[in-house]
Amino acid sequence: MAWKMGGNRAATLALLFASSLLLLSAANCADLDTESDDFEDGYVEDVQEEPVAIDGDEKLAYESPVIDAKKFHFADHFDDVEASRKRWVLSQAKKDDIAEEISKYDGIWNWESPQRIVWANDLGLVLKSKAKHAAIAAPLRQPFEFKSDKPLVVQYEVTLQEGQECGGSYLKLLSAGKDTEQLKSFNDKTPYTIMFGPDKCGNDVKMHFIFRHVNPINGTITEKHCNKPKNRLEEPFKDKLPHLYQLVVRPDNSFEIRVDHKIINEGSLLTDFKPPVNPPAEIDDPNDHKPESWDEREKIPDPTAHKPEDWDEDAPPQLPDTDAVMPNGWLEDEPDMIFDPTATKPEDWDAEIDGEWEAPLVDNPVCEKAPGCGKWKAPLIPNPNYKGKWRAPMIENPNYQGKWAPRKIANPDFFEDLKPFQMTPISAVGLELWSMSSDILFDNLIITDDVEVARDFAANSFDIKRRYIDRESDSFVNKVVELAKANPSIWGVGLVAIVALVALTIYCRFGTAKSQDSAAKKAAAEAKKSDDPQPDDEPEAEEEESDERAAGDTSKESTPLSASPKKNQKSDLDDNEEESKAAESREPAQTEESNTKTRKRQARKE
């Protein structure tokens, strides 16, 4: 049903696309007819249309967001390169569990404009290298304590300028303590409180939200992974555009994950993580074992059933067809394959290493025109007496005891933490990544305890940037391409529509003129068959009067467009005198006529 609905939608979109092209062509044809009428009345002068201001069209400009230190635990828009470089510390550590040559954190970081520059003063922190471990961190202005009644808000932008096939662009909120005092030693083992952000490798797409929970009884730490969102997050890894990621964790243990201001996942720290924060109150008794006599079979073979005497378990499923005969022309003496007679042993062939050389096998050319070659065998047909292996029918097990399960005992490690929001304080933020794509740009990273502050910060940075990019990309061509990507079937219909458009345009350009010429010739031929007067045969005075009315002149003299062969012949002198008089009287008339016939039309914009 879903497939049919998708197919109908694609077909409808394709039909609308084709109809639009045909309507445009028809409108073009109509305009051509109108233009031809304009040219018949006089020449047409193109006049440029004045630009019209669009209501609500705002001029988008970027200025670095103002950072009020009192409102943020951390904030960096990366536009002030000097100040930002002093804030961030490049890791000089090594990974412990891999080879020495790839253990270094030698990925390259730089402060620069994006590849698609929107504003020159909008910079970001860019991971330049790929297939290398990279780590960089910065201390918070003040540690974030989870003891207050305010939420934790983490927000930052990521632009995967080269797309992403395998790698992450997440960040880590590092736990306060001795291990995070020296950020030059920041590595994958450095304790963190929260890890948040996108990650992808192949078809495995994730939006990480992991927090490290401390066991209140024994102090052990376990990672709690948020359940996956219902919808897959695909576009940010493909479209190479900036995307805004926001995590909000509230004191009531609720959380919210947004991408570009849209909620993609939400829930509770208590119920939507694996493993759960609180262990079960009871567990299976590890010392309890299933008795050997326990029967948990629901059905058993019928012990009273017996195999019929005529049941042949050895009968084959197929038999040679006894009625089949070898086709005429079958070449039993010719093999199907022969050694290639054109093959030669390679010069570098070593018999001791490669073995004895043999030419490769090819199809026997003699068999191409024959029904077949080699030993003929009758085709196999189903064996009517085949029954297969006999098995007794299944019946209900009278001794069924159900599925065995160990008994439950009290969990010795049970605890109940109803406030998992109270996590380990955060003292720094870090990026510890490995990616197969380069030029990953991070921008406008903030940590605060006020959702409105984060929203205002995004309004003055990310929102302006995306509005500008979307407005620049909002063209007819891009919309058609996006439509075609979503509905591949539209390409075929679009091709047909384009061919129809070209054909209709050619017809409008040339077919109409030819049809008018042929109609005029046909009318002239009909007039010649009958002795009806022709336009050229009308009296000269009628033409002069019509020209005078069109020009608004009082002169009675005008030169006819064509001379009639039926008029009386005049001398050359008379003709010259008439032509000079006509020229004198025609000059002012033509001036007025040109002013009358000249019409203006607005040039259509492409």
Image (spheres, helix red, strand yellow):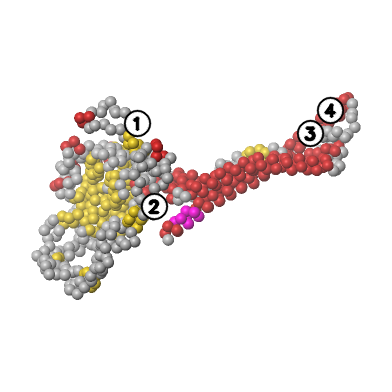
Label 2 and label 3: CA atoms lie apart by 105 Å
Residue where numbered disc 3 is placed = 588
Q: Which residues are magenta?
A: 6-12
- Neighbor class of circle 2 (other Cα within 10 Å; few <14, some 14-19, many 20+) is few
> From what the image shows, is residue 603 above or below residue 265?
above
Which of 529/470 is in front?
529
Label 3 and label 4: CA atoms lie apart by 14 Å
Residue where numbered disc 1 is placed = 341
Mark whose residue sits in front, 2 or 3: 2
Label 1 and label 3: CA atoms lie apart by 96 Å
Q: Is residue 155 visible?
A: no
Mark 2 or mark 1, earlier in chain: 2
Instruction: Looking at this view, name the residue that lies furthest to the bottom.
Output: 398
Mark 3 or mark 4, earlier in chain: 4
Kindly indicate whether the residue at mark 3 contacts the one at mark 2 (C-beta within 8 angstroms).
no
Mark 1 or mark 4, earlier in chain: 1
Q: Residue 606, located in which quarter of the rendered image?
A: top right
Q: Where is residue 225 shown, x and y percent of the image?
A: 23, 55
Mark whose residue sits in front, 3 or 4: 4
Residue where numbered disc 4 is placed = 580
Residue where numbered disc 2 is placed = 324
Q: Where is residue 50 shown, x and y percent of the image?
A: 58, 42
Mark 1 or mark 3, earlier in chain: 1
Q: Secondary structure at mark 3?
A: helix
Which residue lies at the image location 39% right of the left edge and 52% below the top edge?
324
